[in-house]
Structures are given as structure tokens and as C-alpha cells.
Image: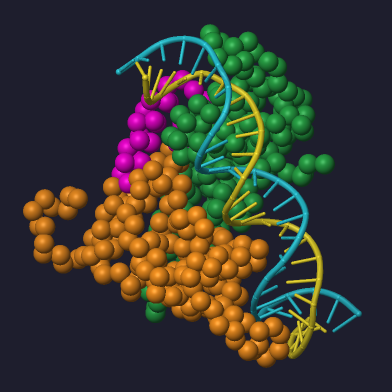
Chain colours: A green, B orange, C cyan, D yellow
Amino acid sequence: MPRSRLTGFEQVLLGMIFTQPSTGYDLKRRFATTSLGVYKPSSGALYPALGRLERRALVRSEGLPPADGGRPRRLYHLTEEGGQAHLDWLREPVVPETVGQDLGLHLVRFAMMAPVLPEEAVGEFLVSLRAALAGFVAALERQADAMDTGGNPYAALAVEHGLAVHRASLAWAERAITRLAPDSPRRQGRSGLN
Amino acid sequence: MPRSRLTGFEQVLLGMIFTQPSTGYDLKRRFATTSLGVYKPSSGALYPALGRLERRALVRSEGLPPADGGRPRRLYHLTEEGGQAHLDWLREPVVPETVGQDLGLHLVRFAMMAPVLPEEAVGEFLVSLRAALAGFVAALERQADAMDTGGNPYAALAVEHGLAVHRASLAWAERAITRLAPDSPRRQGRSGLN
DNA sequence: ATCCGCATGTAACCCGTTACATGATTCT
DNA sequence: AGAATCATGTAACGGGTTACATGCGGAT
């Protein structure tokens, strides 16, 4: 019996195959280009992961004839359960504790919501992301205040870095929210405050 | 024969013990507090890592009597080679390719330079970090331009997020550089450039 | 009576990296 | 001739997470 949750990597693979049925090599290429090469999975990570997804019946594969010499390829596409698993993942709320470590993964998730989730759900995601970021920024501010009197001089600067970065992230979330719903008539009461 | 390079985690442990000889539990507590709990190593990560450092003769430990009931503790301190390894690590230049993934580790490294490196070396580090960030931002800008015509609507927004975050990081590096050397008479030629 | 903090450690499990194997075609 | 691209896969190795073991003192 496989473990219950998929890894982040497996979820991302699932999403890429959802968007477009692909071979392993296709996926490699897309990682290299669309993420600026920030993460390039090795063969030893990619192919076993595809195998695990198939054993779980989230994807199926069919053999493809070799394209102009070389090995035969294997095209993966999602099953019904696979599609459901992907949608469930996209709809997961942002857990505040993860925003300090997994911010990148959340953004990948956001990018994949493109045509598959209704705008409303995307809005909910952004709102929960904004809340998590605001909480994290507040915690960093408390830490910065409590620390800077007495202590190593660069540690305070390092905390400032975290603060600057997460404030930028928070500002982005706010921009994204207003850009997504430029004319949302509901909730015009408390102006912009959640 | 152990692998040649230490892991990031091992290097950080080394640095913490360099700053102050510690027991395993001390280190746990410091992770929980000084990093806002962003990374709390498990026992299964911490104690074997300390063991590896000791086998490499980078740290030594001596038994401490149990403090008010409970188990005896084990206090770790650096050896000569350990101190050297830590200094070498602190002095490593910033490899541009790592700035997209390992930014957090670079900042931890910066925070640890506190009293041990001369200001000049810290300045060099910041300058190389700034260069790496500038390169990464430029690459993201190229990608943003090349992409936004035709493609999923949120992917462009996600790239904007990366852009916003790394620009904030870059701005921080610039602030840190000017703050570190507010009165550096050398190099007043090209005003502020590299 | 039980849970929490202190304090160190081990074992099972999982997954990622590195490095290699295979083999055809095309570029230099 | 040698290298790179296409394309999939496996084996060794390493290290992290989870969960458990142990055992005392103090708090609820």
C-alpha cells in the first residue's frame, strides 16, 4: 500500500500531464525551460516518479513508436482519479506554516490553476495566501523588534532580508487579487480589508 | 571514506557550534527560535549529523553530567579543522546558479559572518550576491518578455512573483552594501558601480 | 493520572542525486 | 572520431522524516 499523500514533485508532474499528455523527456524539457532551470529533475527522480503515479492508477501510459530512430517512447496521460487528485491539490488551502518554506511550490500551484479552476476559487487561494504571508511578515517583524538590541549585527540584516522578500510577496498577492477581480461588486463594504 | 563536501545542514551545524559549543538539544532549541521554526531538524537528522561531523574530526564532544535528572548530555565543540572548514565555507563565493534555489542558505551564511570575517570579506560576499541576483533578475525579465504574449494567464503572474521577490532581495543587497561601508574612501571612481 | 520538557538515540522507509547502460542520428 | 541530442531506465549511496525507546521531574 503506497503512502497516502503525493510528494510535491509528483503533484507537479501530475499537473503537467494534466495540462498536456507527455513523455518523460517532454517533462524534462519543460522543467528546463519553464522554470529557468531552477529545478531539473534527474532521470533517477523522474522515471521512478512516473512509475509510482502509474502504480497508483493516477496516470496511464501507452507506447509510442520511436520518432525517427532511437528508443520507443512512452506517452503518459491522466486517468479520471488522476484528474481528480490534481483538482483536489489545486483547491487545497494555503497552510500558513508552509509559507516560509514552500512558497515556490505554492506559486507553481497557482500557475497551474490557469484554465481549470473557476476565478472564484483562484481568488480564494490568493486570499488565503495573502493571509498566510501577512501572518509570517508580522511574525518576522516581532522577531526583528525583539532582537536588534544586542546581538550579532548581521543577523538583524538577515531578518530584514526575510522581511523584504515576504513583504514583496505579500504586495504581489495584493496586486494579483485586485487584478483578478477588477469589478467585483460584492463586498464593497469594508474597502479592501478582509 | 566520507564524501568530500559537507551538506548545507552540516555546515550550518558547524557554524552554530563554532559560535558557541552546544549540545544537540541546544541546537534544536536555537533552530526553533532563531529561524522562526522554518526549519526544525528532527532527532533523526540532528544526531546522526553530529556523529558524521565527529567522525570527520571536525567536532569533538565531551560527556556532561545530567542537569537535574534525566540523561547525561554531550557538549560539542569545534576542532582546529572544524574551524577552518567553517571559515572556508563562509568565504565561498556565491555561485550564480544557486541563487534561485539556495537563497535562504546564503542568508544563513551571511548571518554567521558576524564577528569572524573581516568587513572586507563580507563586502565581497555581498557584492557577489548582488551580481548573482542581478543576473537572475535579468534572466527572469527576459523570460517574462518572451512569454506573456500567448500562454496561460497566471503563469505570467507567477513569473512576476519571482521577479518581485528577487528584486526585493537585490535591493536588500544594495542597501546592505552601502550600510556596511558608509565611508569607504577607496574606489570613489566609478560611483557605486561594482 | 497524564502530559509536557528535557535529552539522546535508533530503525524503517522513502526519495533524490550521481553515475552508468543502451543505441540511433546529427553536428563539428 | 568524438560529442551532443533524443529517450528510457537501473543501481548504489546518502540523508531526511516518522515513529519509537528510554527515563526523570514538574505541571494540570
Q: Can residue A192 be seen in the rendering of this structure?
A: yes
Left or right: A62 in relation to A24: right
Q: Nearer the viewer, residue C28 or A84?
A: C28
Quadrant location of residue B122? Answer: bottom left
Question: Does A113 lie within the magenta span?
Answer: no
Question: Residue C16 sits in which quadrant?
Answer: top right
Is B95 in front, or is A43? A43
Query: What residue is drawn where x is 60% and y is 75%?
Result: B25
Which portion, as a residue range, is magenta?
B132-159
Location of residue A75 in the rendering, given as x and y in whole percent from the top left corner: 65, 19
Is B15 located above or below residue A13 in the figure?
below
Q: Main secondary structure of the magenta part?
A: helix
Q: Residue at x 47, y 34 (%)?
A: A35
Q: Is residue B140 magenta?
A: yes
* Above or below for A158 versus D26: above
**Residue B65 rendering spot, x and y as whole percentages:** 63, 89
| Residue plotted at (35% across, 31% down) | B142
Q: Position of residue A30 (x, y in %)?
A: 51, 27
Rendering coords of residue B31 (x, y %): 55, 68
- Left or right: where A117 falls relative to B111: right
Q: Is residue A99 visible?
A: no
**Considering depth in this image, is A173 or A97 the residue closer to the camera?**
A97
Q: Is residue D13 left or right of residue A51?
A: left
Front residue of this view, candidates B102 and A44: A44
